[in-house]
Image (cartoon, grey):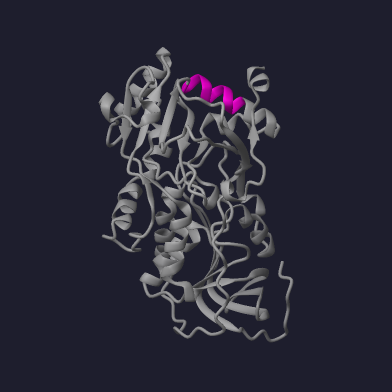
Amino acid sequence: MSSFSSTEPKPDIKVDVLIVGGGVAGLWTLAELRARGVNAILVENTALGSGQTIWSQGILHSGLKYALDGISNTASAGIGDSPARWRRCLAGESKPDLGAVSVRSDRHYLWRNDSIVSRLGMVGARLAMRTPPAPVPFDQRPPALRDVKGEVLSVDEQVIDPVSLLRSLASLHQDRIGHAQVVGIDAGKAGVDVGIQSQHGDQMIRADHLALTAGNGNAALRELAGLDPKSQQVRPLRMIMVRSPELTPLAAHCVQGKSTRATITSPVDSEGRVIWQLGGEIAERSIDMTDEQAIDHAHQEMTEILPHINWSQAEWGTYDAPRAEGRTKSGGRPGAEVILQEGRIFTAWPTKLVLAPQVGARIAELLPPLQVSEEFCDQLLMPPIARPPWDKQEAWSVLTPQASAE
C-alpha cells in the first residue's frame, strides 16, 4: 500500500513509463523505450548496478552451462539470439551503442578433469550448442591452461566489464536517470502515482505505466503496490575472489561431469591487479559455509583443477551474490527472462545478464499507444555507479601452509 496520500494528488513529474531499478535490466529498458520515442525516466535509490549487475561475472552466456548434458533445454534455448545482439551493440553496429564497454574476453575456454562423465559433458556441449566449442591448439591456450591435462576448447561467449557497461548505458540518457527512493505506489485509472524522496524532498511521479526492474528489491516494491511479493524467488550464491602475482587474465569453465566445477573470470581492480572471480559449483557449495570454510574449500578446488599454479601468495575474499528471479513452480532457475504484467505495472527479472535486451524489448512491445507529452521537469540528481566487490573488500585472507594443508 502507498505511504503517501492526497485528496487531489497533483504530480510533480508526468511520464509515460517510470522505471524503478538501475541495474542492467532497468538501464537497457530505458534505452529501448527512449529509442522508440517513449517518455521514460528511471530512478535508483542507491547506486547504478548495485546488486546483481555489479556482482556478476560479466559473462554473456551462450547456453554452454545448460548444454553439458547434450540436451538443448529451455534455459539454453531461452537465451536465443541475445548474444548476437550484444555483439552488434558492443561493436557499435546496433543500438544501444556499447562501443565504449570494455570486453574482457571475446571467448570462454572450457576444460575438463579426466573423468568419463566429464568427457561426456564435453561431448554434450558439442552436440547441443548452436556454435559448438572448438579445440584450441596447445600453443594458443591461455597461460593458465597451458599445463592442464586433456583438451581445451573455446566457446563463442564474451565476457564484459559490468562497471563500463553501467557507465555506457547511463551516459546515453543521463538526464533521464534520478537518484531517489520510492516510498509509495498507487495504481489508479489515471495512471500509477509513485511517491519518491530525492534531493528535491518529497515528490510524486505520475506514470502511465510502471516497470519494476530492481532485482531482489522488486519484492518490497511489489508490496508497496499491493502486489504479491512472493512472485519472485531468490537463489543464494557466495562468490570467491582471489588475487596473486601468479594469476593472468582468464575466462574459463572447468567441466566436472555435466556441470561446471568452476567458472573463472578475471577483472582488474582499481590498482591494476588481476582478480579471479570464482563461480560455478565452487560458489554454489559455499552457501552454507563460513568465510574461512568457503575460502579453504575454494583453495582446495583450485589446487586440484590447476595444480601447476603457485597459490602460496594468493589472497582470498568472498561476497554474497543472491540472485532474484521470477518464481517457478519447481523452484529451479527460469528458462528465460520473466515479466509479469498486472494492470499498469510490469515486474521484470532478466534471470541472466545476457537476457537484459529481451526484457527491454518485451516491455516495449507490451505497452499500449501512449499519449503523454515529452515535457519533463525537476531533473533529479544522477546516482553514482556501484563499486565492484574487489574494490570494496577491506580484508583479504592469506592461507598459511598449515591451514591450507588441513
Residue 369, picture quadrant: bottom left
Q: Is residue 102 magenta?
A: no
- Residue in the image at 37% along x and 18% along y: 120
Q: Is residue 236 visible?
A: no
Q: Please give left or right for residue 250 compared with residue 378 in the image.
A: left
Q: Residue at x 41, y 66 (%)?
A: 31
Hey, which quadrant is residue 249 in on the image? top left
Q: Residues in magenta?
A: 297-306
Q: How many marks?
A: 0
> Is residue 306 placed above or below 359 in the rendered structure?
above
Is 305 one of the magenta-colored residues? yes
Q: Quadrant of residue 288?
A: top right
Residue in front for this viewpoint, 220 or 87: 87
Point out the image quarter for the C terminus: top right
Image x and y of residue 260, in percent? 47, 28
Residue 225 position in % (x across, y down): 66, 65
In front here: 154 or 302?
302
Q: Residue sitting at 41 percent across and 36 percent down? A: 250
Whether residue 361 is situated above or below residue 173 in the rendered picture: above
Q: Position of residue 385 (x, y in %)?
A: 54, 61
Does the magenta stretch mainly form a helix, a strand or a loop? helix
Residue 333 can be seen, yes or no: yes
x, y (%) of residue 164? 44, 57
Quadrant that contains the N terminus: bottom right
**Pick the front one: 342 or 239:** 239
